[in-house]
Image (cartoon, rainbow, N blue to C red):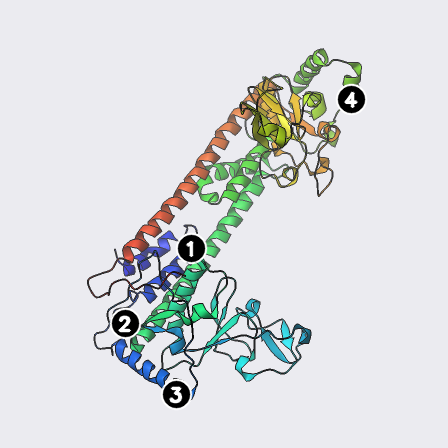
Amino acid sequence: MNAEHLLTHFDRLTDAPDAIPRLRRFILDLAVRGKLVEQDPNDEPAAELLKRIATEVTRLKKTGEFHEPKSFVPTRRSGLPFRVPSRWGWVRLIEVAKVGYGFAFPANQFNSDKRGMPLIRIRDISSKDTQAYFEGSHDAAYLVKAGDYLVGMDGNFNLRRWAGRDGLLNQRVMRLNGWRCDVAPEFIKLPLQFILDHLHGGTSLTTVKHLSARQVNGIEIPLPSLAEQHRIVAKVDELMALCDRLETAQKEREATRDRLTATSLASLNAPDPDLAVFQNHAAFALDNLALLTTRPDQIKALRQAILNLAARGKLVQQDPNDEPAEELLEEIEAARSDRIGSKRTRRTIAQKKIVREEAPYPIPEIWAWAPLGRLTISRDGERIPVSKEERSGMAKVYDYYGASGVIDKVDNYLFDKPLLLIGEDGANLINRSTPIAFIARGKYWVNNHAHVLDGFSEDFLRYVELFINATDLKPYVTGTAQPKMNQARMNSIPVALPPLAEQRRIVAKVDELMALCDQLEASLAAGEGTRGRLIDALVHEALKPAGNHHEPERSLGAM
């Protein structure tokens, strides 16, 4: 395996996380190590170029145009080996370029009306235009011209070539120009960016957030012959253009898949489609789940579509032999009456019947509509909140539930049977990052942030659970900063009730499809991990030294 082989086949791995950015970094890595193009033995050795640079620096010192820094922090390369070919050399950045630093221009002379000179701040380095202008007098030493290289000395240390109109160099911006001895600036920027990236994102002991002049003065650049510099720049340009094409193709592929996925899921969620058309859409979506869902957000949308189908009677076939839901509703109400205690409790949970003409959407004939309050029994009065401080001293034995599930464990319990919990407050009521409704089992405690509902049976509560998770709860929520769904509003939620036998079939089918979604997520994560590890292995193999034409590792340094 070598670098050329990896670059040839890299497009097959572009679905891996951050594949294109990683390829760009890999190209830069190859370039600065002398592994991107072949060395030509007929090239002038870099040592000759270094002699000319040294002669030029000596001359500039005599004329006062070059000042040797009194102190500097030598840069080092720790961790990743860094070797260059034996025909290369090393030179300090300040010996091949004129390095300048910005000035803290008085803020009271800034304006945004484009009067005076453009003021180039860190935020402007990557653009051609600036947002601020400076009207006062200025020193020509701080002038930036098109073609100068700029580096923000705070933030990510990105190196950019200025392409805008002449401007003024603001504080915390570094400028590179005045290139010496015909070195190629387009090449120098490659190892310089590589080293700056290392300083910014190296080990915890060497990571730098703010670049100083002392550190810049110590940066050493690996330098090949001028001819090889030009070959490397040309190859980098060619490969970066390939990355651009791969990135464009990747975006187009993702956009096409996104449109197909969105269209397929939308067709499943249509209010009342033609049955034959709907069955075709459903068959296509279920047969092509792996192709339609390649990102976690798409699988989340698929889960919601499955719940929507279940709540509308479109997930399983109706059986005309099933007992109609109206009869089940009568049984539920009779069972509730036997279990409800006082007349006051009966009055508080009484709910208006829902007629089909006023229902949210059409349902099968043997189904029925009923408000949630007619189908369940509230046990909210049995909830007891326990503060975090109190819980900290308890033995961790029983689950302690909040609005979105188990949040702690406590040393006692309030409930000892399967019950349906529905989040009462919190942003999750709106953004649905986790299920709103869930079944609690075993012995457990519930605080006052989750409604507690008992019901006809556990199977029945399972159906109500999936129905609530399929329902948009925004109409039943009050408040925006602190969303809340009180008991009265929750009880008014219309529930589409199938026959009990169909409820069981629906729950079983949902469980089956959700398990498939789990497999898709696991496969997606495993695939991303596999592709990521494959890229790492290929890059590691491609960066291995070949032969003996490289010198021993050269330290670039510890900060």
**Residue indicated by mark 3:** 62
Q: Which is more N-terminal, label 2 or label 3?
A: 3
Spot occupied by residue 141 in the image (x, y as percentages of width and height)? 53, 82
> In front of the other: label 4 or label 3?
3
Spot occupied by residue 272 in the image (x, y as percentages of width and height)? 63, 36
Question: Is the residue 100 above or below the residue 212 in the image?
Answer: below
Spatial CA distance of label 3 from label 2 is 28 Å
Residue placed most toward the observer, 59 or 399: 59
Number of marks in the rendered image: 4
Please name the residue shown 75% across and 24% down the image: 353
**Residue indicated by mark 2:** 88
Q: Which is more N-terminal, label 2 or label 1?
A: 2
Spatial CA distance of label 4 from label 3 is 96 Å
Spatial CA distance of label 1 from label 4 is 64 Å
Please name the residue shown 31% across and 62% down the image: 82
Q: Indicate the quadrant where residue 168 lies.
A: bottom right
> In front of the other: label 1 or label 2?
1
Is label 4 in contact with label 2 (beta carbons under 8 Å)?
Answer: no
> In front of the other: label 1 or label 4?
1
* Disc 2 element: loop
Question: Is the residue 181 above or below the residue 467 in the image?
Answer: below
**Residue indicated by mark 4:** 348
Residue placed most toward the observer, 225 or 11: 225
Q: Which is more N-terminal, label 3 or label 1?
A: 3
Is label 1 in contact with label 2 (beta carbons under 8 Å)?
Answer: no
Drawn side of residue 46 relative to residue 252, left or right: left
**Residue indicated by mark 1:** 205
